[in-house]
Image (spheres, grey):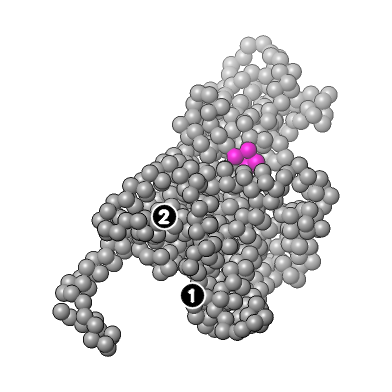
Amino acid sequence: MTSIAGEGKGRAVPEGFEDRGGRRERGYGLAALLILVGAAILRFWGLDGGLPHLMTRPDEEIIVLQTRLPAMGNFYLEWPGQHPGIPSAYIYLLWAWGEMGLRVLQFLGDAPAGDYLAILNTAPDRLLLTERFFSAFVGTATVGVLMWTTRREFGRHAALFAGLILATSVFHVRDSHSAKPDIALGFFTILSLGLLAPLARDLTRRGVCLAGLSIGMAMAMKPPGILLLLPAWLVCMQGSGLRGWRRILPPEIFLLGTIAGLFFIATSPDFVFNPRTLEQLLAIPGFVLPKLSGTAPPGVVEASDKVLMWPGLFYHYDFSFRYAFGWPLMVLLPAALVWGIFSRHKMAQISAWFFLLAYLVFGTSPVLLSRYMTPLLPVAALLLGAAVVMGVERFVRAGASRVLLLSVLAIGMLWEPLVASVRFDQLMSVPDTRVQATRWLADNTQKGDRVALQGSVFWTWGDPQIPKGRRIVHWDRSTEPARPLQADYLVVHDFPLFSSQADWGAVASLGDSARLVATFDPFVGDPGRVSFENDDAFYVPIRGFDGVKAPGPVIHVYEVVADPAPRREPAG
């Protein structure tokens, strides 16, 4: 027998106990490391998908071009139109990251020489690649923080299960390939919840300050981070030693909120001191909850009349979480939330309440995009992993049987999202049809040729980039029906998504003067068996990956001739 050092009460444990504990720790460390490596592979694989086309994922081009301002020394950002919702702190962070990443790419010979502004003008896709590296890095780190938090609160098995859930989540993998703030918000969300949970047990001044700082960082990534003040208020009440009505508003919540607010203002000063940007920030509630805020433009209110509350909430459950985690975990998610609310574990309680609040806010918005739920995926993974493991531990006592059952459950529950994540990465590694079309135009047209574009709706996401030296002609028969086509080539793109809708009547009106010379078709067989997110102009499926061989829309290139007599076609 040997006593445990530091106990001071003569308690003894059998010989070899510490060795077994050490082996368990080493086993956990190795398993956690393998999960992190797997998460990194899924997030960095295919990271350059769609490049050098800047609009592979909507809004990426706006974000990378906004970094021009801090690179020029201008830290007051002017967003185009009503686009913001992204604090300037996130742009500053991407710019600083891009400055370092550009030097790495140049050292590796993967970017031309020049400073940040020069590369932004000549090869902006190289800077966009560095910003995607940031999302992939933060997405991988989120898995690590999730396992750290879950292990502290629920044990090793729950930590590994939760880590596997998030590591294989296809939507978390997808958004880790994008230079958008949703992944960064998810990182600081799970970090903040991990820092808040101990405050319910021990409300220390240091813990309050750290949690406030983390929440401020979440807000600096994206304004919905302010929703973290709800679990902050809950833990401050639970950990407070006050009694009566004073416990409802403990002074610690004011300290925490002040730190979070000051960090946000310090890192995004233009959101407060720039009147135009502040006006756009205050307008965000109008777009999220147009009927309740009273600040929404009339057009947004009219649009919201067509979107009911319950269909929006059901959409994110049946679509966003269905395809993020697979149907077994989707079915278990409501049970995990109920368990979290009524659990004695403070981490489970505050995670469940935060999840429900954010879900209601995002789900009742007339804008339904699955990436709005991406910051909630780490929280859902924590609740699901802890609920499954604690349920198994309650009914299965033997350690070996418990591990075996958890392994079987992990394979059964995570096989679908894992396969989808791998297929997503494989698809992102194939040249986009827009990139293929650009290369064809570069090889088969001459400088001075007029290239007409047709098919874009609302924005030019589906248009391939036109090589330098060619004149771009936008042909829209809906606005100018009598206008003849004055071009040498016509590029038409079409797709099941709203953003690529070709006017085939207009193409047919050209008759024999338009000769099809190239087609770039991403589909294999029937496009009807492939599913996309209809409201997002992202040309990568969420189901039916076997029916697609490349990202991007269907693109047809026509040569336009004044004389329809037979003539030699350009080389394919």
Q: Can you give x and y, in whole percent of width and height, for residue 8 in the image?
A: 27, 88
Residue 566 higher or lower than 88, as above or below:
above
Query: Residue drawn at (47%, 68%), measured in percent from left and top?
Result: 345
Query: Residue drawn at (64%, 23%), measured in percent from left and top?
Result: 558
Q: Left or right: where does residue 430 sit relative to residue 258?
A: left
Q: Is residue 455 magenta?
A: no
- Specify the segment rendered in magenta: 533-537
Residue 398 higher or lower than 152, as above or below:
above
Q: Is residue 98 visible?
A: no
Which residue matches tag 2? 388
Label 2 element class: helix
Residue 338 higher or lower than 330, as above or below:
below
Q: Can you give x and y, in whole percent of width and height, for residue 181 in the image?
A: 59, 57
Q: How many marks?
A: 2
User: Which of 373 and 65 lies nearest the eye of the viewer?
Assistant: 373
Q: Can you give x and y, in whole percent of width and height, for residue 244 in the image?
A: 64, 82
- Looking at the picture, which amino acid does disc 2 mark? Val
What label does residue 198 carry, if any? Answer: 1
User: Which of 406 and 439 lies nearest the eye of the viewer?
Assistant: 406
Q: 10 Å neighbourhood of mark 2: few (<14), some, or many (≥20)?
A: many
* Image quarter hosting the N terminus: bottom left
- Looking at the picture, which amino acid does disc 1 mark? Pro
